[in-house]
Amino acid sequence: MAEVNQNGVLAGQIAVVTGASRGIGEAIARRFAMEGAKVVVSARTVEESDHFLEGTIKQTVKTITDAGGEAVAIKSNLADEADRRGLIEQSIEHYGQVDILVNNAAVTWFIPVVDFAEKRFRTMMDVQVWAPFELAQMCLPGMVERGRGWILNISSHAAIHPNAKAPGGHGGTVYGMCKAALERFTTGLAQETFGRGVGVNVISPGLVATPGVVHHNLINEANKDRVTPVEHMAEACLRLCNGDPNEITGRIDYADEVIAEFELEPAALI
């Protein structure tokens, strides 16, 4: 039976998880809480009426606290500078310095380049590239000072260069750009922080039936057999946020490969 272990591998650590109202972010928040982390659950959706997809940060927090874990909900629109800064400032005020930062939040439109509006382009870049960069800037000084910390960025197979001569694309060019930039940011930051107690990694989930994936009709007859449980992603993320940061850093990973490499048994979530 799933339960919270207050003496788990993340005992007493402060974890900020963005985009945690539903899907992968929610699963990561729950899994980290199960290992004793105090989790800051962040997203734009506080009430059910705030978004057409199911899930809120209040509900994620309730799931964690009802199971005996510790979590707080902090609303943050990562396209907004004040909200980005407010997220880390409020996290520190509530729990203390951030030990783990998980950049999971995303906003995405699948539109061909010729039709892509500048406003939407800038919003995607702000949320998926600049926000992880700026949040890391705010968390890193404390991590380096204490000699410990983890930054985990959530990417996608969309970061992999497509076959330019194959038909398709489905309007995913800008999304792929964002994720490719996020991966290069990860390895560069890992190099900058190596030997200072901070591990920086990036991971892609594979195909998970999150509310967003279902909404964008990304699961079809051709790929439905490759859908993996969200618990696999949560377990892989946990593995990349504990241990020796001199060994586990600068990795561009995929959830299924992490599960196999470390012989993990994904836990049921609270």
Image: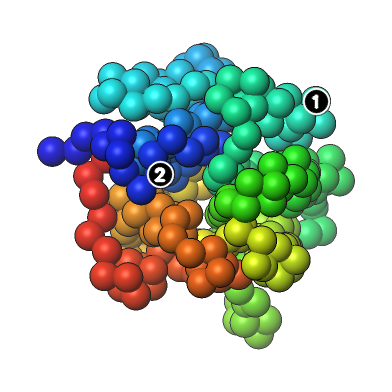
Secondary structure of the residue carrying tag 2 is: loop
In the image, residue 9 sits, relative to residue 74, either above or below, namely: below
* Residue marked by disc 1: 82
- Foreground: 70 or 156? 70
- Disc 1 marks a residue whose amino acid type is Ala
Residue sitting nearer the eye, 153 or 190:
190
Q: Is residue 138 visible?
A: yes
Q: Which mark is residue 10?
A: 2
Most extreme residue toward the front is 146
Q: Position of residue 88 (x, y in %)?
A: 68, 31
Q: Do the residues under discs 1 and 2 have CB atoms within 8 angstroms?
A: no
Residue 17 at least partly seen: no
Q: Which residue does the image show at 21% across and 34% down from the upper left?
A: 3
Packing grade of label 1 (10 A; few <14, some 14-19, many >=20) is few
Q: Quadrant of residue 183?
A: bottom right
In the rendered image, the vertical position of residue 132 relative to residue 222, given as above or below: above
Residue 171 as seen in the image, left or right of residue 80: left
Q: Give whichever of discs 1 and 2 has the lower sequence position.
A: 2
